[in-house]
Image: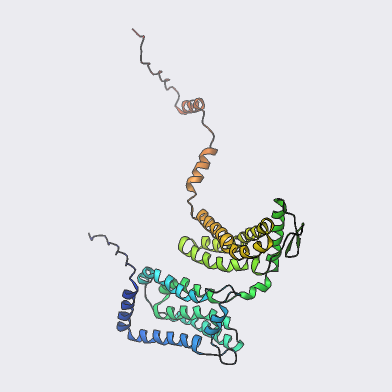
Amino acid sequence: MSAPAQSSPSTPRPDIREALDRLWNWCARNRLHALLLAAIIGTLVWYFCGYEPLNGGVMSFFRWAREAWNSENDLEHGFLILPGAMVVAYFHYQKFADAEKRPSWLGLLPLLFGILLFIVAVWTLQPRLALVALPLLIIGCIWCLWGWEVTRVALFPCAMLLFMVPVGFLLNHTEPLQRLVASVVATMSNLVGIGVDRDGVKLLAQDGSFQCEVAGGCSGIRSIMAMTMLSFLYVHFNLNEPWKKLLTFAMTLPFAVFGNIFRVFTIVLASKWIGESFGTGPWHNISGFVITIPIAVGAMIFFGELLNRDWSDVKKKLLAEDAPASDPATETVAKDAEKPAGTPAPRPAAGPISYDY
């Protein structure tokens, strides 16, 4: 009889220098693949950084993105997303090492779609489409070179690159959110005794001491942009089942709006009790980090922990509490009824002191 197969120990994640050494050794063993990989990287760098189809042939897609990563689009951290995705991929080293390497021509499907999207971006001068094409091109190349198992591990770091796409244009379509936040905050203010009237998206104190306006950026859209990235990372590293990930990620919008409602409410309180110049000035500038993000992140973590919790013990306790209490006399009658006819009744147990002589 053969001995049972022992599972191989997990490969420890190497440091950067060791990882580069292994990449160099892989290139030495697979020169054709290494040459193809270098050509792919060089092509991507050229077409995104060197090719200049925008503004009359003087601006590349990367330069446009770099200028669009600004405070107006709430994307000052845009230049950190690509390095961040590379760090996330590095933390998945074990999965990359264990994945089966089997090159596949199926990778041409996302690759050709990414190329088509890039051509459309050049033709229509829509740089956002080019940025969307980048993760598709990377996924297609990985699929062709190493196969689907490696591609599946790389899907999450590649999807992170979509957060490089500026979506500041959404600020022009936030009026429903603005009205919702203004209406809820006006109701909350009146409940605590601060008379506030709502005029569209404006909050006007009844005594004329202050007035606030829920602008497009204060509707919660900026918090949604930050929360989307945080939620994307949280569900990937903390939740396992796909339905839990999708549900928690879908709750990003209500969590961000919920946190932003309390932020605007604190602005009203500060304007009333301290002064309008403070409430709509310094406190307005820092309250997003002090109020909105902690509340939204806390709600997301709490929701995720509820989904991850093992509810079997709670269910057992609830069922045990709902079960009717048993009557000893009823149990004795039931047991006697189950005995066959003619069975003598059991003698009572003798006490500690016997009076039989």
| Residue 213 screen position, x and y as percent | 70, 65
**What residue lies at 53% left-to-right and 38% top-to-bottom?**
321
| Residue 315 screen position, x and y as percent | 51, 45
| Res. 345 image quadrant | top left
| Residue 155 screen position, x and y as percent | 47, 72
Q: Quadrant of the C terminus?
A: top left
**What residue lies at 53% left-to-right and 68% top-to-bottom?**
229
**What residue lies at 61% left-to-right and 87% top-to-bottom?**
124
Does residue 16 sit above or below 53 in this rendering?
above
| Residue 316 screen position, x and y as percent | 49, 43
Q: Quadrant of the N terminus?
A: bottom left
Farthest residue toward the left?
A: 1
Q: Nearer the viewer, residue 320 or 266?
A: 266
Q: Nearer the viewer, residue 34 or 242?
A: 34
Does residue 347 sit above or below 156 in this rendering?
above
**What residue lies at 60% left-to-right and 68% top-to-bottom?**
222
